[in-house]
């Protein structure tokens, strides 16, 4: 083999390795985008209130389960993932989900009034209908996803759910 032929073969090998790297990177990037957020909305605050709840549907089109591990907002001191449950004696209780919210592969999870939701506390200012609350959802596998959440009485373009009038137990959060 001539020296020129060896250079050509070497260059072809390098280009093949680089191409494989970019294909792997594209597949990895595609896997990260398997999470889709839809129907997001947050309640307007009342009076001088600095607390609100946000709701949405999180879909996972991927082949692996994921977990919504945390949520942040530049407009809030604290954001937590909460679950509302009815106790055996008929009392509604709300508690943070310390281990996050599971989002099954090929499935979805609905955050809605009376169920799991995002609790936003210590807002810098009130939220009025028509505004937007910026949230960053942090998933164990998919990473961080920024979601501009419309402020209103229900999902944009959707009807208000019958139990959306109030989220029990949201007064007194600190």
Image (cartoon, rainbow, N blue to C red):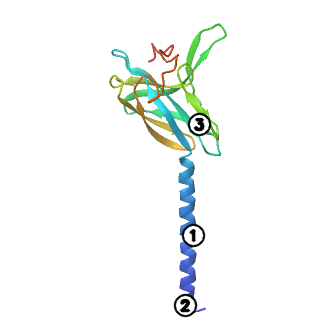
- Classify the position of the C terminus by image quarter: top left
The percent position of residue 6, horizontal first and vertical second, equals 57, 86
Q: Which residue is mark 3?
A: 67
The percent position of residue 130, horizontal first and vertical second, equals 35, 27
Please, is residue 106 above or below residue 170 in the view?
Answer: below
Residue farthest toward the top in the current orientation of the protein: 89
Q: How many marks?
A: 3
Q: Which residue is mark 2?
A: 3
Query: Would you call the spot at circle 2 few (<14 residues within 10 Å), some (14-19), or many (20 or more)?
Result: few
Instruction: Measure the C-alpha gap from mark 3 to mark 2.
Output: 54 Å
Residue 100 visible in image: no
Q: Residue at position x 33%, y 16% from top?
A: 48
Please, is residue 94 above or below residue 133 in the view?
Answer: above
Residue 43 visible in image: yes
Q: Which circle's residue, 3 or 2, is located before the other in the chain? A: 2
Callout in the foreground (1, 2): 1
Circle number at residue 17: 1
Q: Residue at position x 35%, y 29% from top?
A: 131
Query: In which image quadrant can residue 74 be found?
Result: top left
Q: Which circle's residue, 1 or 2, is located before the other in the chain? A: 2
The percent position of residue 7, horizontal first and vertical second, equals 53, 84
Please, is residue 97 above or below residue 136 in the view?
Answer: above
Disc 2 is placed on an element classified as helix
């Amino acid at each position: 083999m001539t020296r020129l032929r060896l250079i050509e073969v070497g260059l072809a090998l390098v280009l093949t390795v680089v191409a494989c790297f970019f294909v792997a990177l594209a597949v990895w990037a595609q896997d990260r985008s398997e999470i889709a957020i839809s129907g997001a909305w947050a309640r307007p605050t009342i009076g001088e209130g600095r607390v609100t709840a946000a709701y949405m549907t999180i879909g996972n089109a991927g082949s692996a389960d994921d977990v919504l591990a945390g949520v942040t907002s530049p407009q809030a001191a604290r954001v937590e993932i909460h679950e509302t449950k009815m106790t055996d004696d008929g009392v509604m209780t709300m508690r943070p989900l310390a281990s996050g919210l599971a989002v099954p592969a090929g499935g979805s999870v609905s955050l809605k009034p009376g169920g799991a939701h995002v609790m936003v506390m210590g807002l810098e200012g009130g939220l009025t209908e028509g505004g937007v609350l910026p949230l960053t959802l942090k998933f164990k596998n998919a990473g961080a996803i920024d979601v501009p959440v419309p402020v209103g009485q229900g999902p944009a373009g959707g009807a208000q759910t019958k139990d959306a009038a109030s989220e029990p137990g949201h007064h007194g959060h600190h």
